[in-house]
Image: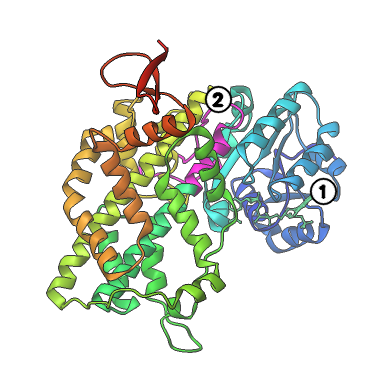
Amino acid sequence: MHPTAHVGVTGLAVMGRNLARNLARHGYTVAVHNRTPARMRALVTDFGHEGTFIAAESPVEMVAALQRPRRLIVMVQAGQATDDVIAEYAPLLDPGDVVVDGGNAHFADTRRREAALRERGIHFLGTGISGGEEGALDGPSIMPGGSPQAYQLLAPVLNDIAAVMPDGARAVAHLGPDGAGHFVKMVHNGIEYADMQLIAEAYHLLRHAAGWSPARIAEVFRRWNAGRLNSYLIEVTAEVLAHYDADSGLPFVDVIADAAEQKGTGRWTVQTALDLGIPVSGIAEAVFARSLSGHTALRATGAALPGPAPTLLGERDAARFTDQVEQALYASKVISYAQGLHQIQAASETYGWNIDLATVAAVWRAGCIIRAAFLDRVRDAYTTDPALPSLLADPGFAGEVGAAQLPWRLAVSHAARDGVPAPAFAAALAYYDSLRSPRLPAALTQAQRDYFGAHTYRRTDRPGTFHTRWDTDRTELKSN
Ligand code: NBP
């Protein structure tokens, strides 16, 4: 086999197949391989007319087909499958070749794989790809992490196939070394969970409070989509809510079982945030809400628990409430981005990645699931001050969230009063109030810890670490 392929793609399920087609449509000669060859053959048969594919029946054929330095994109299931594929290819590759893992790998795995391949002189680019199968075909948001040399080898290719951003730039940028790209993609997914949960809570509140049909609420989302909430997820929500089930004639959302599933990246975001000590309560509530929804037996038991009698708002009050919900949704969305970006900032410091948050916000503006108009402003905030300690430290966002606080509080209190669960709205508001509180009850918590565990405490009036002998009321200075 002549080495004529510019790039190879192995793993041709929905993502790999569409990414290979995207590459071929951009004029690249693409060598394609899949463990089960039928998938590879189907791709060449069905889409061969879209560009130049080289059918590789084995990893050996794949490697032989690639121009040097070889560029191999792995698009298989995250976890063991990715390790298996790397183990299969690594002995066949040469120093200077580059392996791109485009799957949803855990960033710790990416760090491990990058280090192992570096030992052999092989570059490794751990690359988050967002946008689902449609994005993979038409232009995803691409979040690569690896050495600058590895990125340089792939940059022109990734640039060609990435989504086009509103200002004409491409939704791809080198985010940092080893696990940086997959970490950013993981947090992207965590924010996606929060975004979706907040939207779901807004819908649920409107349905309960106003008694409106899903189709009428779809109109509200359409209107919101023309304003500051403009985003792919709000657009999708309007489409879904306006959709009727062809069989039953019922609103589509009413015939779907209310048990949400998850693949794991949201959970990883929360687990990692716990390890880093970063509060991502909005994202965590979204993950927990999905989990709780799936506990069918538990929910059946809970169905008998008492709650308040629901109240239905009249038209004028419902219109006012809709505005409150919009404000609550926007403010809570800003909080979940603030939390996610804080997590990226913390990981960047821990792992020495030097991630630029303006660049992160920029590559999320197109192609990916959380693409939203307001990301232009998030990018601008971090361009103005790359060391911004929080999105809420930006005067523009602080002003908007502050202006939304009263309606936000009214929406959350309405939910509590009427017994409609709105955990992500409430968590976001509690985070906001915690940030602005001059004193938190953590002082009491620390005193309790010292009481039962001699865990010591610091004082507000003098330096040092202290322990109080609570039986004798004697305070000891433990360290300065
Ligand atoms: P899947 O995640 O469903 O993986 C299926 C692919 O992995 C098939 O090509 C399969 O080969 C291959 N594979 C497996 Br499973 N075990 C293997 C092994 N031991 N050796 C070689 N190949 C193996 O595919 P996907 O949904 O296209 O996603 C691909 C990657 O992209 C995943 O990491 C996913 O997390 C990520 N991702 C997916 C989406 C999405 O919307 N689906 C979005 C963003 C990122 P076979 O055909 O022989 O079984």
Q: Main secondary structure of the magenta part?
A: loop
Disc 2 packing (10 Å; few <14; some 14–19; many ≥20): few
Q: Please state the horizontal and vertical placement of residue 64, each as a whole percent of the image.
A: 84, 38
User: If the image is split into quadrants, where does the C terminus sit?
Assistant: top left
**Which mark identifies residue 351?**
2
| Image: 161 above or below 37 | above
Q: Residue at x 29, y 60 (%)?
A: 225
Q: Residue at x 32, y 44 (%)?
A: 431
Tag nearer the camera, 2 or 1: 2
From the image, tell me which residue sits under label 1: 56
Q: Residue at x 81, y 61 (%)?
A: 38
Q: Which residues are magenta?
A: 160-189
User: If the image is split into quadrants, where does the N terminus sit?
Assistant: top right
**To which quarter of the image does residue 334 belong?**
top left
| Image: 333 above or below 171 | below
**To which quarter of the image does residue 241 belong?**
bottom left
Residue most extreme to the left: 316
Residue most extreme to the top: 480
Q: Is residue 107 magenta?
A: no
| Image: 459 above or below 160 | above
Left or right, 71 with respect to 451, comes to right
Q: Please state the horizontal and vertical placement of residue 99, each as a whole percent of the image.
A: 71, 35
